[in-house]
Every structure is written in structure tokens, then in C-alpha cells.
Image (spheres, helix red, strand yellow):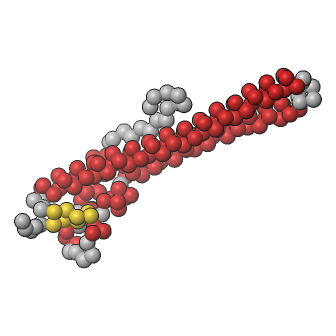
Amino acid sequence: MSVARIGLIDLDGVLRASTGAARVRELLDEQRREFQREFAAREAALQEAERKLVAQREVLDEAEFARQLAEFEASVTQIQKEIQYRREAIDVAFQDAQSRLRDLAIQIVTDLAQEKKLDLVLVRESALIFLPSLNLSDEVLRRLDERTKNARIEVTVSPVGTDQ
């Protein structure tokens, strides 16, 4: 078997430079900011509830104080679970979007290899020395940006306890 025509691709570089990846990062950054705003407000409410509970410690009988303390601690635990869940959901959404972009880029490389009748396409990191004309990265980036320019990228994080 002989390999006559070779191409190279800097796949990671293409993905970092793509407008689709930039939009994904922007959307996820907005999700993170929204998440932080929401939980900052809830944290402030918890701190206020804690202050009220501490202030009532001398007024309430021991059983009632213990009951309210248990409710407060349950609320704190629930919010901690929600924070962890939302962080994981945002990370999963980012990984999923990146994976879809990578799959699309690989499909574009495959199409380009067929068009150019290439026998082999290597990841650029695999080659130490090569002719610049073998590098497919710019064309792949152009096509990836073209294919994703009108794509709607939505990132949603489901509330705790619901299916995504």
C-alpha cells in the first residue's frame, strides 16, 4: 500500500479558533453568571434565616429550636446539592457542545480529504516537518465557521430532579 497524498490538520487549534466554540463559551459563561447571581441571592436569604434563627435561640424552647435548626440545615444541604448539580450540568453541557463541534470538524476533514483525494490525514502534532500546502486547518476552520454561523446553540440546565 502506498500513500501518495497527505494532509495535516490542527484539529484542536481549529476548534479553539472557531466561532461556534466561542459562542458555546459565551453561552456557558452567561449560564455561570446567571447561576452565580441566583445562588448569591439564595445564600443571602439563608444567611438572613440563620441570623433570625440564632436571635430566636433564647426565645424558643429547645424542641422548637432543634426543629427549626434541622429545617435550616436541610435547606442548606438542598442548596449545596443544587449548586453541585448545576455546576456538573454546565460542565456536561460544555463537553457535549465541544464534542458536537469536534464531530462536525472531523466530518469536514473527511469531506475535504475526499474532495482532494487524500490518502491520509494526520493530526498536525504527529508531523515534525511538513510543507505548508499540506495543512488543511484554515480550510476546515472556514467551513466549520460557515456551517455553524446560523446554527442555534442552546445551553439549558434542567432543575434538580428533572430529566435533561
| Res 149 seen here | no
User: From what the image shows, is residue 78 above or below residue 23?
Assistant: above
Q: Quadrant of residue 39?
A: top right
Q: Residue at x 24, y 77 (%)?
A: 129
Quadrant of the rendered image containing residue 132: bottom left
Please tell me whether residue 58 is drawn above or below residue 140 in the rendered image: above
Q: Is residue 153 above or below residue 57?
A: below
Q: Give me the residue at 67% from left, 40% from top.
A: 40
User: How far across and how far down the image is residue 15, in percent?
Assistant: 35, 56
Asked whether residue 39 appears in the rendered view, the answer is yes
The x, y position of residue 5, in whole percent, is 11, 66
Q: How many marks on residues?
A: 0
Q: Quadrant of residue 44?
A: top right
Q: Residue furthest front?
A: 63
x and y, in percent, of residue 160 in the image: 54, 31
Note whether 116 is above or below 104 in the view shown. below
Q: Of residues 97 and 146, which is closer to you in this image?
A: 97
Task: Quarter of the image for the C terminus: give it.
Answer: top left
Horizontal and vertical percent for residue 83? Answer: 60, 39
Task: Name the quadrant of the N terminus.
Answer: bottom left
Residue at horizontal 49%, vertical 27%? 162
Residue placed furthest toward the bottom: 129
- Looking at the image, residue 31 sits to the left or right of residue 53; the answer is left
At a point 85% along the width and 23% down the height, the residue shown is 63
- Residue at the left extreme of this rendering: 1
Q: Is residue 62 left or right of residue 103?
A: right
